[in-house]
Amino acid sequence: MSQKVLLNSKEVTIILHRLACQLIEKHLDFSDTVLVGIQPRGVFLAERLKQILENEYQTPEITLGYLDITFFRDDFRRTEKPLEANKTKLNFIVENKKVIFIDDVLFTGRSIRSALTAIQSFGRPSEIELLVLIDRRFSRNLPIQPDYRGRQVDAINGEKVKVSWKENEGEDGVYLITS
């Protein structure tokens, strides 16, 4: 198994700032916009973006929630191992809000399809956008594309893209893993 560095810590930081600036350009004060991190790995990206927006770009308090999609997935009954759900933490209604789904890697699109179903339990958003750190563009099973992408990666199906966050693994980085 080999591992290739796609993004180092400095490159991840630069991309996060670029994504934050793109969000500010589109949403200005975020008064009608909420960030929703897709559990489990999108939460790290969502928290980091919220921190950058509030602390470095002086954006007023941003509403952030976490959405668990475990039981909304179309493949959750097809596995032998028991599933472990994560927490959904949405202390707000999304009715008539602009929702930005945030996830680390966009692969087949199935997680985002699940998130579209799951969010309906919390109201009807006026619009939904998608922000991802990594877009694996040739792996899509569904017609889902990101509105904001950090980096596009052309990985074949035998390769895996792994995102490490300093909050979880001790360092920021993106790796292409080949078996």
Image: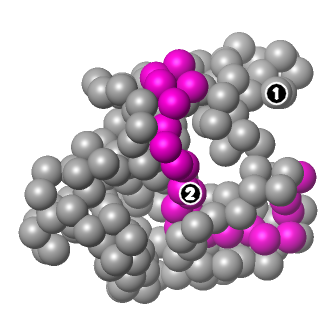
Is 54 located above or below residue 38 in the figure? below
Does residue 3 show up magenta in the picture? no
Residue in the image at 89% along x and 52% along y = 141
Q: Which residues are magenta?
A: 120-141
Q: Position of residue 16 (x, y in %)?
A: 37, 74
Please state which of residues 33 and 115 is positioned toward the viewer in this rendering. Answer: 33
Is 102 located above or below residue 75 in the figure? below
Q: Position of residue 51 (x, y in %)?
A: 21, 59
Q: Which mark is residue 45?
A: none
Residue in the image at 40% along x and 77% along y = 22
Which residue type does callout 1 highlight? Asp
Q: Is 90 positioned to the left or the right of 143 in the image?
A: left
Q: Kindly indicate the quadrant of the structure image that contains residue 50.
A: bottom left
Using a 10 Å C-alpha cutoff, classify the residue at mark 2 as few (fewer than 14 neighbours), some (14 to 19) or many (20 or more): some
Q: Which residue is mark 1?
A: 74
Q: Position of residue 79 (x, y in %)?
A: 84, 22
